[in-house]
Amino acid sequence: MEAHSLFKKQGFDVCSYGTGVHVKLPGPSLREPNVYDFGTPYKYMFEDLRRKDPELYKRNGILPMLKRNLGVKLAPQRWQDNAADGSFDIVLTFEEKVFDMVLEDLHNRDQVLLKSVLVINLEVKDNHEEAAIGARLALDLCEQIEAVESWEESIDDVIASFENRHRRKLLYSISFY
């Protein structure tokens, strides 16, 4: 959601999704996560955690994160349920496991439009600081892609340039709708 927030502020047409079965937020211990269904409003999650232990969830950054998310969109959405949202030009993931799940889902869909979609993974550790860095890097990458006339013809050069400049390895693949 950090990247979604930044992209939205920069004027990009952006959506964000999760790929799991549920939305899981850290709880009082690793064995006690807070689990919500996709579609549960961020406002409900915020109020629920504030009611459970406001100090813990403020200290670990979950309440501020949910407050930010409230300003971005109503509720988390699941990638595998997004077909009605239309097609995307680029899909960014921030974890290799999610990259694989997105590609698998795209390959399992009927490719009736024959419209290409670029799927890129920029590996980012799941914490607030790394999410902020990853969001800025993702924005830089998308601005580079947007600056070329045809990403299909230039993507190898754009990726190589990004990797050299930022010392980050990217995974990417092309799929179709």
Image: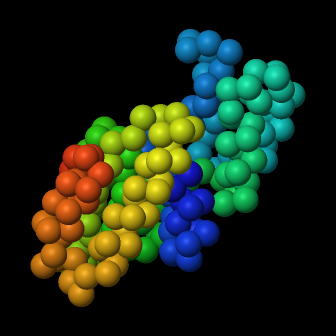
Q: Is residue 67 left or right of residue 75?
A: right
Q: Quadrant of the C terminus?
A: bottom left
The spot of residue 51 in percent (x, y) is 86, 28
The spot of residue 89 in percent (x, y) is 34, 74
Residue at 64% x, 36% y: name it: 36
Q: Does any portion of residue 128 appear in the rendered image? A: yes
Furthest residue toward front: 165
Q: Is residue 133 left or right of residue 58?
A: left
Which of the two residues, 113 or 160, is positioned nearer the viewer here? Answer: 160
In the picture shown, does residue 127 fall above or below 87?
A: above
Q: How many marks?
A: 0
Residue at 24% x, 87% y: name it: 149
Q: Does any portion of residue 98 appear in the rendered image? A: no
Which of the two residues, 47 or 5, is positioned nearer the viewer here? Answer: 5
Furthest residue toward right: 51
In the picture shown, does residue 7 fall above or below 65?
A: below
Residue 107 quadrant: bottom left
The spot of residue 20 in percent (x, y) is 45, 39
In the picture shown, does residue 48 fall above or below 137?
A: above
Which of the two residues, 65 or 102, is positioned nearer the viewer here? Answer: 65
Residue 148 quadrant: bottom left
Q: Is residue 35 left or right of residue 133?
A: right
Residue at 58% x, 68% y: name it: 8
Residue at 39% x, 64% y: name it: 140
